[in-house]
Image (tube, grey):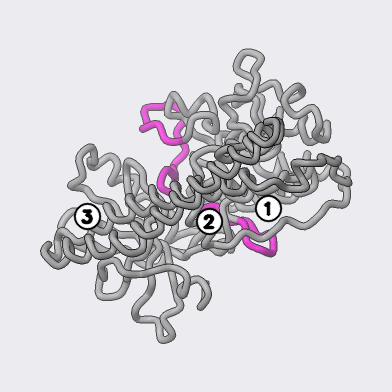
Amino acid sequence: MGREYTRRVTFDGPLLNQRWRLGPRVGSGAQARTYVARDERAKRRERVAILKQFDLKKEGSGWKNFDLFEREVRVLKSLRHPGIPRFIEMFESEPGVFNLVMEKMPGATLRAIATKVRFTDRELRDMLARLLEILDTIHRHDPPVIHRDIKPSNLIRDAEGHIALVDFGGVRDVIRESGGSTIVGTFGYMAPEQLHGQATPATDIYSLGATLVALAGKVEPEDVPRNGLRMDLQRHLRDRDRQLVSLLEAMTEPNPDQRPQSARDVSKLLREIPKRPSRPLPAVSQREELDKPQDRLVARPFDGLGDMLANVPQPFGFVLRLLLLVFSIGGYVGVTVLQSVLLPVVFALVGAAAGERAKPKIAATRDDIIGALDEGKAGFRSLQAHCLPSAKRKKRLPKPK
């Protein structure tokens, strides 16, 4: 992780287990909150990790969800692969609040990268091959481990192209085909059998195929045109390599019995696709990863505004651009002052008046507000960029292949 990352991120949250200083919150779900944490025992204080906090006292939590948390701990302890986060420790910070600390994988999520680039066919094949190796490892584990929630935001890629699979909070480590389990997964990426509580290695194959579909077409799988239950990939991905599209069709076959049954089956089909040269993937900084809202693979705010302004007759176009630019700069400055000056003062006063037990909740509230303000700043930056004319908008040229 290193010096650059710890210097950019502020670790000012509570100290847990006399070791882990909480930093920004990077995820939140029905089961747990996830933070970046710094190891205060590390000699050079450069070691950071991911801390996942599960509050059993939280409304809506129960022993069924806690079972998923314990299962994640058990699975991470037993798995050994460079593309899977390493288990560090688990502890109870206060009655009913359990914490899982694991390795922080370097890089950015594929969802974040996909908002900046369009992956080529070769890049998609390379990522697929790397992920199939990880799936082969967890599926061949004794007992087999089914992830059940593979999607772009749970896949992290570093600058060298290495891929990691994270968030094992929904894993199943015993294959059951009779149903009766809690439904785990994300709509659009879930195989149909998951709605009945069923999960086998072929279930992860479907989710991985749906993930590649999302990265190839920059559209959520649930929004892809369909023929019945099947995604119409021949129409949706018509500009992609036909053999790759056929492979994705096989991986996302609704009937699990007609789907490839193992990662090795898919790898064999993948090796039959001819390889073509391609450009390297650009690196995405971890700070960009923390700052960026990543709920869906959609266009950025104000997409198309620049083109619309370019069609406004002069001098009205210039005046409109100027007014929007002044508004965006003023809004950005206002949010920045609120975030960097007023907010720390308010929470410092609240924290001083509150007891130790209330500090984690105060820190979580602060992170929520900071996240909302970061999204506001990103929106104002996007508006500024679209108010400034660029050569790219004035003259659109086809990109060289």
Which residue occupies the foreground of this view, 189 or 307?
307
Going from N to C along the chain, the mark reached first, 2 or 1, is 1
Q: Residue 51 at x, y = what percent?
A: 37, 61
Kindly indicate the quadrant of the structure image that contains residue 92: bottom left
Residue 363 visible in rendering: yes
Residue at image position (26%, 57%) is 98
Q: Give the range drawn in magenta.
A: 157-185
Q: Residue 3 at x, y = what percent?
A: 51, 78
**Other-residue count near label 2 (Cα within 10 Å), few / some / many at <14 / 14–19 / ≥20:** some
Which residue occupies the foreground of this view, 107 or 209?
107
Rounded to the nearest whole Å, what is the CA distance between mark 2 and mark 1?
A: 21 Å
Task: Report the residue marked by disc 1.
Answer: 130
When the figure is inspected, residue 131 is found, relative to residue 304, above or below; the finding is: below
Residue 139 visible in rendering: no
Callout 2, which amino acid?
Glu
Task: Report the residue marked by disc 2.
Answer: 289
Which residue occupies the foreground of this view, 5 or 162?
5
* Disc on res. 361: 3
Residue at image position (43%, 56%) is 333
Judged by depth in the image, the label closer to the viewer, 2 or 1, is 2
Residue at image position (63%, 34%) is 316
Callout 3, which amino acid?
Lys
